[in-house]
Amino acid sequence: MRFSYGMMDERKILLYKPELFLKGNDLLVFPSKEFYKWHGDIKECIDGLYQINALNMQKGKFVNKSEVELAAGVLNIITDELEHVFDRESVSDFSYHYISALDEKYKKRRLNGYTSDMRRCDIQIPVKPEITHLLKERNMMDIVNEVNKDFIMARRKGQKKIK
Amino acid sequence: MRVSEGVPDGNIVELYNPEQFKEREEVIVFTREDFHNTYNSISGQIEYINKIAMHLDVGDDWKLLGYWPKFLERIYLLDLNMDLIFQEEPVQCYLDTYLYNSIGSSEKAVAVSKSKVPVQLKFSI
């Protein structure tokens, strides 16, 4: 994302990199210290989510419902933080600043997994009774007989009218 | 957080709400579109996870085997978006129109047999 720092000077902002914004776009301006704090807070929450997954990475352990609830709780914190960006009344807590120290291996993505293609192959739709050629023939003959009967009835009605 | 919109004018930005900031305060400036796209993407990932997580009942732990990797994918995208904010290069997959990702399902498209399946199992992976 293109961004530039700036300095407030007599009700205007002096840009450090004005060449990025030459096209006259609309710009959004945030105080940089609070923005960094906001960014750090959300990164902290995301690292928390990766830590929940770390339990899953151990052999023989799987994620259960309580961990999903925990993750949902952390996501709620992130949602609140997102709203806090545009809330002018909110005050940031500068008592600490989070710097991510999470090892990269916890963020590793499992590229293989149970994909939707695999699921489609695995779904077996049971068919009872088994459709044989005989069954198809019988079904077709049933339809033909039905139509034949209707045809004869209609012709009889037609002959009655003529008489 | 205090925020203001502004319009660039050469070296300077003319603010709509200059009273928000103090004199000589350091600020960070984004284009509204870039920030809007990233912000919406972040919200979208969270919405996706919340939608599915809300419908998982107690005793559906076996479903988590399939859903948890999906959650992780979205969390990874969330992480990526947050890193994107401070990357100097313009976004590589920058599109003019923003693709709204959702897991909506329209009733019309559902086949007759599927309409007898309970709601929780309708989410397409």
Image (cartoon, grey):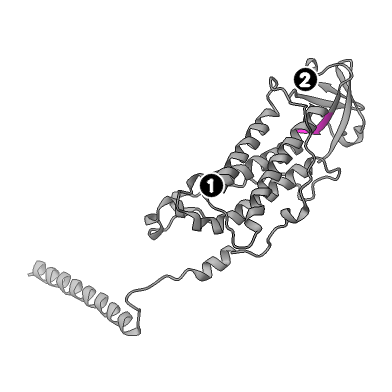
Callout 2: helix, strand or loop? loop
Task: Point out which mark residue A134 bears.
Answer: none
Q: Which residue is mark 1?
A: A66
From the viewer's side, name the closer residue of A57 and A155. Answer: A57
**x and y percent of residue A54 in the render?**
67, 53
Q: Chain of mark 1?
A: A
Amino acid residing under circle 2: Tyr
Q: Which residues are magenta?
A: B28-32
**Do we see residue A25 in this rendering?**
no
Task: Point out which mark residue B16 bears.
Answer: 2
For the residues labelled 1 and 2, the Cα–Cα distance comes to: 47 Å
Q: Chain of mark 2?
A: B
Q: Dots 1 and 2: beta carbons under 8 Å?
A: no
| In this view, A121 is above or below B43 | below
Callout 1: helix, strand or loop? helix
| In this view, B89 is above or below A38 | below
Classified by dominant secondary structure, the portion drawn in magenta counts as strand
Count the marks. 2
